[in-house]
Image (cartoon, grey):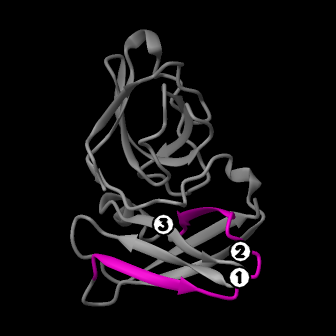
Amino acid sequence: MLYGAVTKPLIADGTANGILTIDDVGLFYPNALVTLVSPMAPTLNLIVVDLISRTEFLVRDLYAATFNTYKDVSAYRVSDGAQVMRPLAAISNVSSVSLNSGIYTNGTDVVLDFGPQGSDFLSTTVTGQGWVTPTAVMSVTIVDNNRAQEAVLEQIHLSVENLIPGVGFDILAHAPNGLFYGTLNIRVMGTVS
């Protein structure tokens, strides 16, 4: 599915702990590259860390050295006309987008291997996951500090599909900008719902 570029005005001032609030986060998703603009503050290139609610999401700096630090976006205010933009993106049927990441109680790390010749699509089957149910809520995150920035810039899209109760699932990876090379470490988290 192809989504056009999205620009949304903030409906609440940004926070020091990386929370942005817009009218609807429906076209935003974890690991999406976004740009925060304001006439009163510098333009920031950010990554969506997680969706908190239907109107709020967490962001971190695109170039941050660690993944668990959020970007201070408190200088971006409604009164200044601050806006968040997401560029054109190809998104597969993402079943991994979730709310409230703190609910996850199960998980596994997976190495995706795009190979030395590269690939623009990869399907990896993960088994041995007895906690998986047909209604499990899943989230997938890039945990490879060495390749995360490259994966984000290449707009790698990850989704969890084909849940098999008591067994596992498939990870689908799509590189819409062309071939992606080598391995990428990800973490799949889920909970029984």
Q: What residue is pinned by disc 2?
A: 132
Quarter occupied by residue 190: bottom right
Query: Hey, which residue is sitting farthest top in the picture?
Result: 79
Q: Which of marks 3 and 1 is nearer the N terminus?
A: 1
Q: What residue is pinned by disc 1?
A: 129
Image-based side of 148 in relation to 129, left or right: left
Residue shown at 39%/21% (left/top)? 82
The amino acid on which the numbered mark 1 sits, given as a three-letter code, is Gln
Residue shown at 36%/57% (left/top)? 91
The amino acid on which the numbered mark 2 sits, given as a three-letter code, is Val
Q: How far is disc 2 from disc 3 in space, using C-alphas?
A: 15 Å
Q: How far is disc 2 from disc 1 in space, using C-alphas?
A: 6 Å
Q: How far is disc 3 from disc 1 in space, using C-alphas?
A: 17 Å
Instruction: Tell me residue 134's x, y (percent).
Output: 67, 69
* Quarter of the figure that contains the N terminus: bottom left
Instruction: Tell me residue 159's x, y (percent).
Output: 48, 66
